[in-house]
Amino acid sequence: KNIQENMTVVSHNLIARNIYELVLRGEITRNMKTPGQFVHIRVGDSSEFMLRRPISICEVNSDHETLTCLYRADGKGTQALAKAKAGDTIDILAPLGNGFPVEAAADTALLVGGGIGVPPLYELSKQLNARGIRTIHVLGFNSQDDIFYADKFAALGETHIATADGSYGTKGFVTDVIKALPKTYDTFYTCGPIVMIKAIQEALPDTEGYVSLEERMGCGIGACYACVCKVDNDEGYVKICSDGPVFRKGELEL
Ligand code: FES
């Protein structure tokens, strides 16, 4: 299957501090398999930047052949991407990687996201809800100005927000919220920085879970070895881009 397409920008908006919502249209959306897959976006049109940036897929609308990506403009490449306007075309490799197994949840799922790890949980929550699974969302941000999609998650299920500075919701980290929640869930899914993923794995030792890593990447398609990560209790290595980015809890040495 072709994984490269020049997709058309449908809309592009700033929705929180340095966070952009980019909606793209193209036939490649028909190939999406699981929530948690990502796109590799070519940024800039010169050799000034590294060629591509991996960005998680936040929502897919196969009827309209659109997908939504949220990203943080925090470097030269993504700041160049932020200038794209409706009608422009962007060179995309998609869908890449293996996403979250929606069939793993039995009844109630806990979805935990931190910062720019929150977006892939939105499509995941939609698909879980479509299967009749109840979702509980715990979303962590640095501060009130960094929060996005809180209402959209709340429309799908119970939603808790934590901010590190206490300017909104619970003051502290997602694990502070989780420790205070009754254990009504059978499965957890999480995406965010490695320190957060480690803390969640430690806080939920008895719950089946899946983690999505969003670490450094190069090619995005398994060819360059920039993203290798060690398998726990094993000599082996996996590539985050093509074996992941989603792995079973505890599978990797983090
Ligand atoms: Fe190149 Fe994973 S990014 S192998």
Image (cartoon, rainbow, N blue to C red):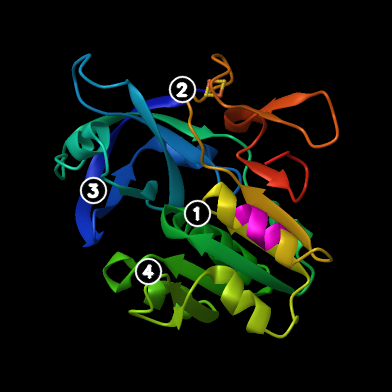
At 25% from the left and 22% from the top, the residue drawn is 49
Looking at mark 2, is its residue's CB closer than 8 Å to ligand 1? Answer: yes
Q: Quadrant of the C terminus?
A: top right
Which class describes the residues within 10 Å of circle 4: few (<14), some (14-19), or many (20+)? Answer: some
Q: Earlier in the sequence, mark 1 or mark 3?
A: 3
Q: Tag 2: residue type? A: Gly
Q: Tag 4: residue type? A: Tyr
Percent position of residue 114, x then y = 48, 60
Percent position of residue 71, x then y = 34, 48
Q: Tag 3: residue type? A: Val
Q: Which residues are magenta?
A: 197-201
Rendered position, 249 above or below 32:
below
Identify residue for label 1. Answer: 120
Which of the two discs, 4 and 2, sits closer to the camera?
2
Q: CA distance from mark 1 to mark 3?
A: 19 Å
Q: Is residue 136 visible?
A: no
**Left-right relation of 85 to 9:** left
User: Do the residues under discs 1 and 3 have CB atoms within 8 angstroms?
Assistant: no
Identify residue for label 4. Answer: 149
Rendered position, 103 above or below 31:
below
Q: Tag 1: residue type? A: Pro
User: Do the residues under discs 4 and 2 have CB atoms within 8 angstroms?
Assistant: no
Q: CA distance from mark 4 to mark 2?
A: 29 Å
Q: Quadrant of residue 33?
A: top right
Identify residue for label 2. Answer: 218
Q: Quadrant of the N terminus?
A: top right
Identify residue for label 3. Answer: 10
At 63% from the left and 39% from the top, the residue drawn is 98
